[in-house]
Image (cartoon, rainbow, N blue to C red):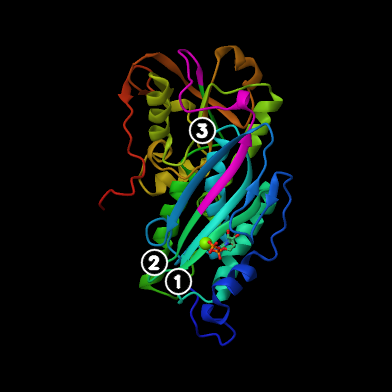
């Protein structure tokens, strides 16, 4: 946490609410044609012409979703945007605008919010989305960030969770389990630091997985890739709560079961090595870890040739019969375990 030791830090009172909004949002540029009116009026105005509007919102609460002891505010701003854009991508839509609402206590100087908004701005630039509004209020304790993302999609390209048909192939982008293990490493190093503040963590051997935790990306590139390959998924979801939980969502909404194959689950070598170090099964990290923000989707078997061998895509299983259960087929070839949702649950007690 940034402390007020440094004289040059600016207390929030100095700017006031409206001054702060101007200060934080003034340098954001509007890029999208669809943005008719951005920050500054009572509401934003968006025009997608003939396309449908896709909207999603997510809230991040200090102490529940992030720990400022090891999450830099710039990364937090970036990640808060990305996790919302990921939801828009999971609808096969193009993210276009975001609204950012923050509740902050006065222990944060203006400079801390500048860091947060710097991360938000980098994400806006990278994903070509416009910041068109939000809300600013005070909080008596921690920091709360709520982001709403808006996107557009042609009606015929819309993809829902329910839509998978029997025998469709189940495909996932990228690799899984890394964000969870990155968090384990950060928490371990933070605990070491709390005991001995002179210990400097060496995160270099964990760069990929820590990066996956602190700076995830929304797979907008996969949406473009699928368009290029002329593949329209039959169902889709983003992997925010772990593979297991997401497969169960597709299953429930599509009214059929899935079989996924342990040896097909994509794992980075660093995930395998770090899981081993922590004495956990890397497949468990992929199934129950979450925060990977990859896309999980089904395609018709007739599309197999189009996606086959693509380094960004792994076929990890297939849809089975209507109303069947969901199974993980183990490496040994003849045993299977029923998939259960052990994904992150905000209301779960420790
Ligand atoms: P109102 O009182 O009508 O809700 P506000 O003063 O809250 O208006 O907001 C003024 C403008 O600034 C609006 O366009 C609003 O969407 C935008 N805004 C407010 N807070 C933020 C923020 N934290 N980030 C981005 N835009 C914001
Ligand atoms: Mg307001």
- At 46% from the left edge and 41% from the top edge, which residue is drawn? 240
Earlier sequence position, callout 1 versus callout 3:
1
Earlier sequence position, callout 2 versus callout 3:
2
Viewer-side residue, 75 vs 179: 75
Asked if disc 2 is less than 8 Å from ligand 1, the answer is no
Q: Is residue 333 above or below residue 284?
A: above
- At 45% from the left edge and 24% from the top edge, which residue is drawn? 162
- Left or right: residue 122 compared with residue 164: right
Task: Return the x and y of residue 196 as percentages of the image width and height.
Answer: 39, 73
Task: Return the x and y of residue 338 as percentages of the image width and height.
Answer: 31, 25
Do labels 2 and 3 touch, CB within 8 Å?
no
Magenta segment: 147-169
Query: Ligand 1 sits in which quadrant?
Result: bottom right
Q: Residue furthest front?
A: 42
On the image, which quarter does residue 221 sit in? top right
**Distance between mark 2 and mark 3 Cα atoms:** 31 Å
* Residue under pointer 1: 199
Q: Residues within 10 Å of mark 3 (few under 14, many from 20)?
A: many
Task: Return the x and y of residue 72 as percentages of the image width and height.
Answer: 53, 64
Element type where label 3 sits in the image: loop
- At 50% from the left edge and 82% from the top edge, which residue is drawn? 4
* Residue under pointer 3: 266
* Residue under pointer 2: 192
Q: Can residue 203 be seen at all in this image of the molecule?
A: no
- At 48% from the left edge and 19% from the top edge, which residue is drawn? 164
């Amino acid at each position: 946490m940034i402390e007020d030791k440094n004289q040059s830090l600016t207390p929030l009172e100095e700017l006031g609410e409206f001054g702060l909004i101007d200060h934080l949002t003034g340098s954001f540029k509007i890029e999208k044609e669809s943005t008719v009116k951005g920050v500054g009026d009572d509401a934003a105005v968006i025009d997608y012409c003939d396309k449908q509007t896709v909207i999603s919102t997510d809230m991040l609460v200090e102490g529940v979703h992030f720990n400022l002891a090891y999450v830099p505010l710039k990364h937090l701003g970036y990640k808060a945007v990305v996790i919302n854009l990921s939801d828009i991508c999971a609808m096969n839509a193009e993210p276009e605008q975001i609204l950012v609402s923050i509740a902050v206590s006065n222990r944060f100087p203006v400079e801390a919010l500048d860091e947060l908004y710097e991360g938000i701005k980098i994400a806006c630039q990278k994903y070509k989305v416009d910041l068109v509004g939000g809300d600013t209020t005070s909080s008596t304790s921690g920091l709360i960030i709520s982001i709403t993302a808006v996107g557009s999609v042609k009606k015929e390209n819309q993809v829902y969770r329910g839509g998978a048909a029997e025998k469709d192939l189940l495909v996932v982008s990228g690799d899984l389990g890394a964000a969870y293990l990155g968090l384990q490493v950060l928490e371990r190093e933070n605990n070491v630091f709390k005991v001995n503040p002179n210990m400097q963590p060496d995160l270099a051997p964990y760069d990929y997985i820590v990066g996956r935790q602190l700076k995830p990306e929304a797979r907008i590139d996969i949406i473009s890739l699928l368009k290029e390959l002329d593949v329209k998924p039959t169902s889709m979801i983003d992997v925010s709560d772990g593979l297991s939980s997401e497969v169960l969502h597709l299953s429930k909404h599509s009214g059929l079961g899935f079989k996924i194959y342990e040896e097909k689950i994509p794992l980075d070598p660093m995930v395998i090595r770090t899981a081993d170090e922590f004495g956990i099964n890397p497949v468990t990290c992929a199934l129950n870890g979450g925060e990977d923000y990859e896309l999980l989707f089904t395609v018709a078997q007739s599309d197999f040739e189009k996606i086959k061998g693509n380094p960004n895509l792994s076929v990890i299983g297939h849809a089975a019969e209507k109303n069947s259960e969901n199974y993980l087929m183990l490496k040994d070839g003849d045993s299977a375990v029923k998939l259960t949702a052990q994904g992150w649950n905000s209301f779960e007690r420790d």
